[in-house]
Image (tube, rainbow, N blue to C red):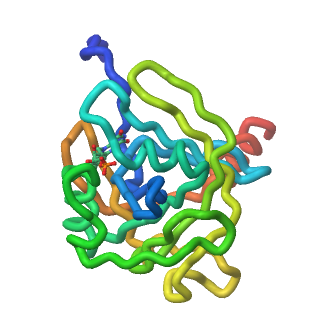
Amino acid sequence: MAKRNPDLRAVVAPSPVIIAAAYDENGKADGCTLALYTPISHRPPCVLIGINVTMRPRKTLGSILHSGAFTIGYPGEDQVTEADYIGVASGFDTDKLKDVGFTVSEGQAVHAPVINELRLTLECEVVHTVTVGSNIQITGEIKNILADEEILDGKGRVVLERLKPLIYDEEGFAYRHAGEPFAEPFRTGTEFMKQLEK
Ligand SMILES: Cc1cc2nc3c(=O)[nH]c(=O)nc-3n(C[C@H](O)[C@H](O)[C@H](O)COP(=O)(O)O)c2cc1C
């Protein structure tokens, strides 16, 4: 198959869409939608978010850096309008969370706002920041997880079919469904390894 060289860019497809939220210096809750987000460590559990500092300023970035804490909330497919609005409007201009009817509670483990209407929230403490190109990359250590009972199985695992996270496809410029399971991780490769050993 012939290879081509598409334009250089960070290909971030697909990626879950989350809403990062933090208190500003006046105690007002800010939130912005992010696709530059990934789990980065199991022990301690940490996540990375990337916030752009070369384009239009993000109010939420200042709030995260000021308070040293933030939450990561997962909007569901039924909250796509709210999530997209929070990703196009700015807290510099309006109270976005109020505009969409979201309410907040104080985090149980960190001083950061938990958006009550989101079914899964990670409460994070800022443990590291570094500038990477156009973005500030923030590492948050997860100090607490808040999940609606309805999205969990009996063992406390998040059931994707119940969470219905929004998947951002930057290449196709679309929000997508999370998709059906089709193979078992670690077992698929282990089975192949056994075949090679025969
Ligand atoms: C689907 C989606 C994904 C986004 N991902 C990011 C991201 O990863 N990093 C970023 O800096 N901005 C991202 N944005 C843009 C911010 O959410 C947007 O600039 C927002 O208005 C900032 O709000 P604030 O000023 O209230 O913080 C995204 C927007 C959308 C709609």
Residue 2 can be seen, yes or no: no
Identity of the residue drawn at 54% across and 56% down: 70
- Give the camera-side residue of 5 and 68: 68
- Image quadrant holding the C terminus, namely top right
Please tell me whether residue 101 is drawn above or below residue 178 in the rendered image: below
Ligand 1 quadrant? top left
User: Residue 110 location in percent, x, y?
Assistant: 65, 64
The part of the image, by quadrant, that contains residue 84 is bottom left
Q: Can residue 155 be spotted in the picture?
A: yes
Query: What residue sits 26% from the left and 64% below the top?
Result: 95
Total count of labels: 0
Q: Nearer the viewer, residue 106 or 177?
A: 106
Tell me which corner region of the image, top left, top right, bottom left or bottom right, holds residue 98: bottom left
Q: Quadrant of the N terminus?
A: top left
In screen coordinates, is 37 left or right of 43? left
Residue 39 horizontal/vertical position (percent):
59, 48
Relative to 11, is 24 above or below?
below
Q: Residue at x 50, y 59 (%)?
A: 72
- Left or right, 27 with reference to 9: right
Where's residue 116, x and y in %?
A: 44, 79
Q: Nearer the viewer, residue 21 or 142?
A: 21
